[in-house]
Image (cartoon, rainbow, N blue to C red):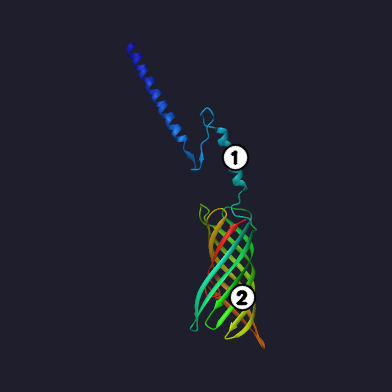
Amino acid sequence: MKTKTIFSRLIYTLLFAIVLSVNFGCAALLDAELNGRETIPFTANGLLDLNELNNRAEATEVKLELRDFYSKHLLGTSAGFGLNSTEGESETSFCFGGEYNYRISEDNYNHASYLGAFANYHTQNADERKLNTFRVGAQYTYFDRITKNSELDLTYGIKTHYEFGDLENFGNKEDITGYGASLTIGANYNVNECFSIGIVAPLASWSQQTFEYDGGELEQENTWIGLNKDNMVMGYARWRL
């Protein structure tokens, strides 16, 4: 009988030790942070606050429902730089400008379509030649998400523009007007929910320009495939509005 009592007490002691150990282990676990940002809530009695966890889950669901995978509005700035040589003359090109894009597709995690407008200034300098033009136009851009973490998109676009400016050539000045179109491809990296950076390069483009000078005018038509001094790679910074 005495042996049975001692055995029973040993069992109870062992169970108590197990429960106590589990309790301390759970407390240490529950003291950890949720997602590294939020602490797990407890009631005044030290129990897990299920109501608070439920409220947080509902708030997160509402936030996700209100958040656009692709912003309705995108505001961007752009800049480009190029070097070239024509008939032994070195040429340096700069281009910078801005754009606005409006999403025309339904919000979707995987892709989005935008219609937009842009304006930029282009300057090109050679030894005895300086070209300055302003371009304004419209564009369509398709964003294709290629990473599961929503960080990287490929972009495909169509751009049309009207341009005006002047050309100083060996002391003579000519006025320039023209128009054109291009197909583009690029990449867009989402730094955070509000800001992204990217590049855009031309696949092919076409333009027609009219040079007006004293005594007449000259029309010139160009078609390009790939990169050149007039079709440089552009770097972008975009903000979600």
Q: Quadrant where the C terminus lies? A: bottom right
Placement of 93 over or under 152, stated as above or below:
below
Q: Which residue is mark 2?
A: 133
- Kindly indicate the quadrant of the structure image that contains residue 142: bottom right
Instruction: Measuring from the top left, give residue 195's x and y in whole percent.
Output: 56, 56
**SS at circle 2:** strand
Three-letter amino acid code of the residue under disc 1: Glu
Residue drawn at (47%, 35%) of the image:
31
Three-letter amino acid code of the residue under disc 2: Thr
Residue drawn at (46%, 38%) of the image:
32
Q: Earlier in the sequence, mark 2 or mark 1?
A: 1
Q: Which residue is mark 1?
A: 58
Q: Residues within 10 Å of mark 2 (few under 14, many from 20)?
A: some
Q: Quadrant where the N terminus lies? A: top left
**SS at circle 1:** helix
Of all residues shown, which one is farthest toward the front? 171
Left or right of residue 172, residue 38 in this image: left
